[in-house]
Amino acid sequence: MPVVDGAFLKQYRAAELDWSPAKAAGLLDISRGYLKEVEGGRENPSERLVGRICRTYGLDRDCFVLDSGGQKHPDEGPTQPVGPKAPPRRQEKEQERKGPKRAAAVGA
C-alpha cells in the first residue's frame, strides 16, 4: 500500500476544493471515518483508492504519495495539481451570483 501525505490531502480537500469530509468520502465511495484515518496518517489507502483520489481531486499522484522514506519526490518539479481545474471556491461562487461590483458614484 502506498504511503500518502494525509495532511496535504486534508488541506487540499478543505481549502482548495471546499469539500466537507462527508462530501469527499461520498465521492470516493468510502466512509467518513476511513477518510479521517487516511487524512490523519493512521491508514494508507490501496492503489485503487489512490487512483480514485487522483481522479476525484484532480491531483497527480506525486502530489500526495510519499516515497519509502516518507518524502515527496524531490527530483520532480513543484507539486501542482494536474487535470481539470478544481471546482470554484465558495467565495468565487458567491461573487458570480452577486454579479459585477457597481462603480462608486462620482462626487457632484
Image (cartoon, grey):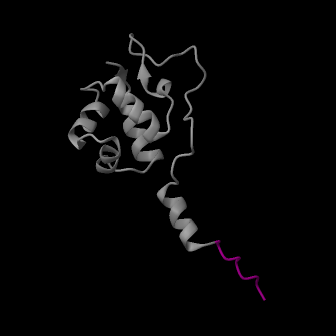
Q: Is residue 95 above or below residue 35?
A: below
Residue 74: quarter of image: top right
Query: Residue 63's spot in the image, x, y percent?
Result: 49, 27
Query: Residue 95's spot in the image, x, y percent?
Result: 56, 66
Query: Residue 20's spot in the image, x, y percent?
Result: 33, 50
Horizontally, residue 79 falls left or right of residue 8, namely right
**Could one spot residue 8 in this view of the protein?**
no
Q: Residue at x 35, y 19 (%)?
A: 2
Q: Is residue 31 above or below residue 61?
A: below
Residue that extends furthest to the right in the rendered view of this protein: 108
Q: Is residue 43 above or below residue 21?
A: above
Instruction: Give the residues drawn in magenta, as a range.
Output: 100-108
- State which quarter of the image contains the C terminus: bottom right
Q: Residue at x 51, y 30 (%)?
A: 60
Query: Residue 48's spot in the image, x, y percent?
Result: 35, 28
- State which quarter of the image contains the N terminus: top left
> Looking at the image, which is closer to me, 48 or 86?
48
Residue 64: quarter of image: top left
Residue that extends furthest to the top in the rendered view of this protein: 69
Residue that extends furthest to the front in the rendered view of this protein: 48
Is residue 102 within the magenta segment? yes
**Could one spot residue 81 in this view of the protein?**
yes
Is residue 59 within the magenta segment? no
Tell me which secondary structure the magenta stretch mostly adopts. loop
Q: Residue at x 61, y 22 (%)?
A: 77
Residue that extends furthest to the left in the rendered view of this protein: 33
